[in-house]
Amino acid sequence: MYFLVNDTLFELDERNLVSPLDARRFASLPLSFVIQLGQELFAEDPMLARNSPERARRLAMLLALKQPGMNAALFVAPARGCRPDQVGARFAELSIDVLAGLHARQNAGALDAVSADREVWRRLAA
């Protein structure tokens, strides 16, 4: 399973998303809490997906567990160290074709914020 966090595509092993013990621990967490956690992480480091990929991967796993079908998240922080409530968050369910294209671009070293935006988020479209 692939999960896009901003402009970085992570491969998540669905069989090992979470252990049974962790599943019980995380079951009580609402999706809103996981989103707030993401906002806090990106407030600390707006480039989290690139600078701390393992933390971003764990966030992606939590999001995928809490919202099956979701496979893309965009967290936009205005500046490093901003307040978490200033971090915008968007989510999407991408088709396998789009994910495959993003995977090919990332493997070629061509997946960046602009190409991910054009393909998925369309924030820069005029």
Image (tube, rainbow, N blue to C red):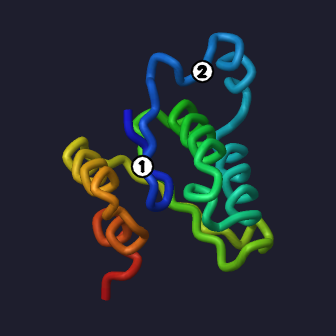
In percent of width and height, residue 82 lies at 78, 74
Would you call the spot at circle 1 few (<14 residues within 10 Å), some (14-19), or many (20 or more)?
many
Image quarter of the C terminus: bottom left
Residue type of the residue flagged with mark 1: Leu
Quadrant in the rendering for residue 49:
bottom right
| Residue matched to label 1 | 9
x and y, in percent, of residue 95 in the image: 25, 45
Q: Are marks 2 and 1 in contact (CB under 8 Å)?
A: no
Q: Quick one: which residue is furthest to the left in this view?
A: 97
As drawn, is 46 to the left or to the right of 107? right
Instruction: Identify which residue, 93 or 6, lies in the foreground.
Output: 6
* Residue 34 sits above or below residue 39 on the image: above
Q: Position of residue 46 (x, y in %)?
A: 65, 67
Q: In screen coordinates, is 122 left or right of 45? A: left
Residue shown at the point (74%, 67%) measured from the top left: 85
The residue identified by callout 2 is 18
Q: Is residue 23 above or below residue 86?
A: above
- The amino acid on which the numbered mark 2 sits, given as a three-letter code, is Val
- At a point 30% along the width and 48% down the height, the residue shown is 103
The residues tagged by marks 2 and 1 sit, at their Cα atoms, a distance apart of: 19 Å
Q: Is residue 28 above or below residue 39?
A: above
Q: Residue at x 65, y 72 (%)?
A: 77
Q: Is residue 78 left or right of residue 1?
A: right
Secondary element at image label 2: loop
Q: Nearer the viewer, residue 35 or 116?
A: 116
| Residue 114 vs residue 95, the one in the foreground | 114
Dot label at residue 120: none
Q: Residue at x 40, y 76 (%)?
A: 123
Q: Residue furthest front?
A: 108
Mark 2 or mark 1: which is in front?
Answer: 1
Provide residue 100's location: percent of width, then percent of height: 24, 45
